[in-house]
Image: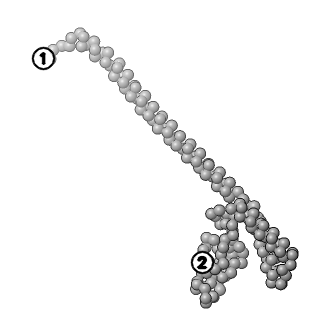
């Protein structure tokens, strides 16, 4: 056992050499903490980049999916006019080749729209849905349940899962 006596020369030499090592360890710890912080920043930046890339891909897919919306919206009034022409001809009792040609053209346009994801909203006799229908009038109808669509004034259209144009309808009063 040693008592509290003076350090030997060998012991005294070790201690001054330990001071630079302690300073070096502190510097290395600071560098390690800085590297960890940079790593965290890089991981966060990488995650932000991946999220941006995924969002851009979703936006591009959505843009492609609904690209025909404007064209379809512009075509719908012409389709409505063809529907009115067929209805007027039938009311007048005309069912000749001209009416058949207009009807065939109307069906062809509806088929083309369908191939591009644009479909007619089936409304007649259905319950009123404010997301897909626009009620323009209410009529009493004793045999129909309240808020049932009695008449479709203008067809509504969907493009995939979105309403392109709501159907204008007359509904049964409660």
**Foreground of the two, 107 or 13:** 107
Dot 1 alpha-carbon crowd within 10 angstroms: few under 14, some 14 to 19, many 20 or more:
few
Q: Is mark 2 on a helix, strand or loop?
A: loop
- Give me the residue at 40% from left, 25% from top: 27
Q: Is residue 36 above or below residue 144?
A: above
Q: Where is residue 16 in the image (x, y as percent from the top left)?
A: 30, 15
Residue at 41%, 32% in the rendered image:
33
Q: How many labels does the image show?
A: 2
The quarter holding residue 172 reads bottom right
Q: Mark 2 points at which residue?
A: 127
Q: Earlier in the sequence, mark 1 or mark 2?
A: 1
The numbered mark at residue 84 is: none
Quick one: quadrant of the N terminus? top left
Label 1 belongs to which residue? 1
Residue at image coords 52%, 43%: 47
Residue 86 found in image quarter:
bottom right
User: Looking at the figure, which quarter contains the C terminus?
Assistant: bottom right
Give x and y (percent) for residue 13.
Answer: 28, 12
């Amino acid at each position: 056992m040693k008592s509290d006596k003076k350090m030997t020369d060998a012991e005294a030499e070790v201690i001054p050499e330990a001071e630079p090592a302690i300073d070096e360890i502190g510097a290395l710890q600071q560098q390690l903490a800085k590297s960890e912080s940079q790593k965290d920043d890089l991981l966060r930046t990488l995650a932000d980049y991946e999220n941006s890339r995924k969002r851009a891909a979703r936006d591009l897919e959505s843009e492609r999916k609904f690209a025909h919306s404007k064209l379809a919206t512009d075509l719908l009034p012409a389709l409505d006019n063809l529907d009115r022409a067929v209805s007027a001809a039938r009311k007048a009792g005309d069912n000749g080749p001209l009416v058949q040609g207009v009807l065939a053209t109307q069906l062809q346009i509806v088929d083309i729209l369908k191939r591009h994801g644009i479909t007619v909203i089936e409304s007649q006799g259905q319950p009123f849905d404010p997301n897909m229908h626009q009620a323009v009038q209410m009529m009493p109808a004793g045999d129909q349940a309240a808020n049932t669509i009695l008449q479709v004034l203008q067809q509504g259209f969907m493009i995939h899962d979105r309403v392109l144009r709501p159907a204008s309808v007359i509904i049964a009063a409660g």
